[in-house]
Image (spheres, rainbow, N blue to C red):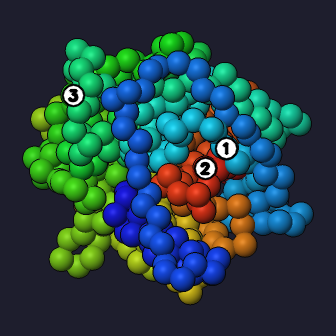
Amino acid sequence: MRSRTAKLARIVAAGVAVSLGLLTPVVVEAGKPNIVSLVDGAIEITASPINSFDGGSTTRFGRLDWRGGLKLTSASDYFGGFSGLAVIDKGRSLVTVSDAGFWMTARLVYAGGQLSSLESGRIGALRALKGKMLERRRDRDAESIGVISSNGASAELIIGFENNARVGRFDLKPEGVSPPGAYVDLPKAMGALRSNNGIESIARLDAGPLSGSYVAFAETKTDDSGKRIGWVFSGKSSRTLKLAPIGNYDISDIAAMPDGGILVLERRFRWSEGINIRIRRVSPKAMQASSPILGETLFEAGSGTALDNMEGIAVHRSEAGETIVSLISDDNFNFFQSTVLLQFALVE
C-alpha cells in the first residue's frame, strides 16, 4: 500500500521542514527508484540490533515472546519499500519484495536465540515472463510473497502485485529470484482489482483441509456491511472470505500457519496515536465456514515500541521447533521512516 502512507509522508515532511525553520514548507516526495537500471547482485546492508521491543525489560506481548529485531539501512538507492516477507530454511534465510519492483535476499544470524545480524544481502529486479523488464511502474507494485515449497535456501514462491492485480510463481535460487514461470488463475473479482485496493496479501496453505489452496485479501475492500473481503481459491474453484472488522484496521499481509490456518497482520494510523498493528490468528475450521471470521487476537501494539510501518509478515519453524513470527516495515523511501525486521515466538 502506498497512497495514504505516501500522502502522510509528504504532509509530515512539510511539517519537518517548518520545524527546522524553513520559511516555506518543503514537500519531500517519497520517490521510488526506477528498477530499469538495477543490476542483480550483492548489496551492502547495515543491521543494527534492536534489543528491546518496548524500551524496557518486557519480553511477552500478548501471545508473542520477543526474539529480537534489526534496523536495516543501506547506501544503495535500491533499498526500501519492503511490503512482503518470507523466511525459510528454519529461519536462516529471508526473501522480501519491494513495492518499487525488486527483491532482496539475505542470511539471518542469531545469538543466544535472538536475531542479531544479517549478512550476504543480494538484490535484483522483479521481472515479467521470459525475463522481460517491468517497464510500467504500475506493474512493479509487489505487495506480498508466499512460499509454495522450500529446500534449504531455495524455494518456489508466489508474489502478488497490487496495482495491476496478478500473482506469479517464481523460483528462489542462490543467485536470487527468477522471472515468473507462470501466473496463477485468480477469481474474477480478485483479478479485477486495481490501484491501491488490489492484492495486498497472498499465502499458500500446505496443511489442513484447504491444503494446496491460495488465500488472499485486498487491503481495504469491504462488503456492504464493512467486512474485509478475501478469497480462498485453487484452480477454477474459489470462495469468498469475510473478516469481521475490529477497530477500523486495514489488512497489511497474511502468512500461512503450519496447521493450515493463517495469521492476519492489520494496521491503523491516526494522528492522535500514530501507527498501531494487530495480528489475528484464523483457524482452518474458520476458513471453511460460511460465516464472517473473527479469529483470535494474538498481539496488539502501538507507539512507544520498535514498530514502524509494518507491511510484511512471515511464519517459520525454528531449529528448536518454535513457531516464529517475523515482521518487516515499508519505509516508503522516506528519511523519517525506517526498515525494521522484528521476530517473535508464538506461545502456544
Of the two numbered discs 3 and 1 on the same chain, state the one appearing first in sequence: 1
Judged by depth in the image, the label closer to the viewer, 2 or 3, is: 2
Residue that numbered label 3 is attached to: 183
Residue 282 higher or lower than 160, as above or below: below
Q: Secondary structure at mark 3?
A: strand
Mark 3 neighbour class, 10 Å CA radius: few under 14, some 14 to 19, many 20 or more = some
* Residues under numbered marks 2 and 1 in contact, where contact means CB atoms less than 8 Å apart: yes
Residue that numbered label 2 is attached to: 339
Q: Does residue 151 appear to the left or right of 219 in the view shown? A: right
Q: Secondary structure at mark 1?
A: strand
Q: Which mark is residue 186?
A: none
Type of amino acid under label 2: Thr
Mark 2–mark 1 Cα distance, whole angstroms, equals: 5 Å
Type of amino acid under label 3: Tyr
Residue 334 in sight in this render: yes
Residue 223 higher or lower than 234, as above or below: below
Residue 66 or residue 40, whichever sits in front? 40
Looking at the picture, how far across and down is residue 49, in whole percent? 80, 46
Looking at the picture, how far across and down is residue 55, in whole percent? 83, 66
Of the two numbered discs 2 and 3 on the same chain, state the one appearing first in sequence: 3
Q: Which mark is residue 72?
A: 1
Q: Does residue 144 appear to the left or right of 223 in the view shown? A: right
Mark 3–mark 1 Cα distance, whole angstroms, equals: 31 Å
Give residue 147's quadrant in the image.
top left
Type of amino acid under label 1: Leu
Q: Does residue 2 appear to the left or right of 70 in the view shown? A: left
Count of labels shown? 3
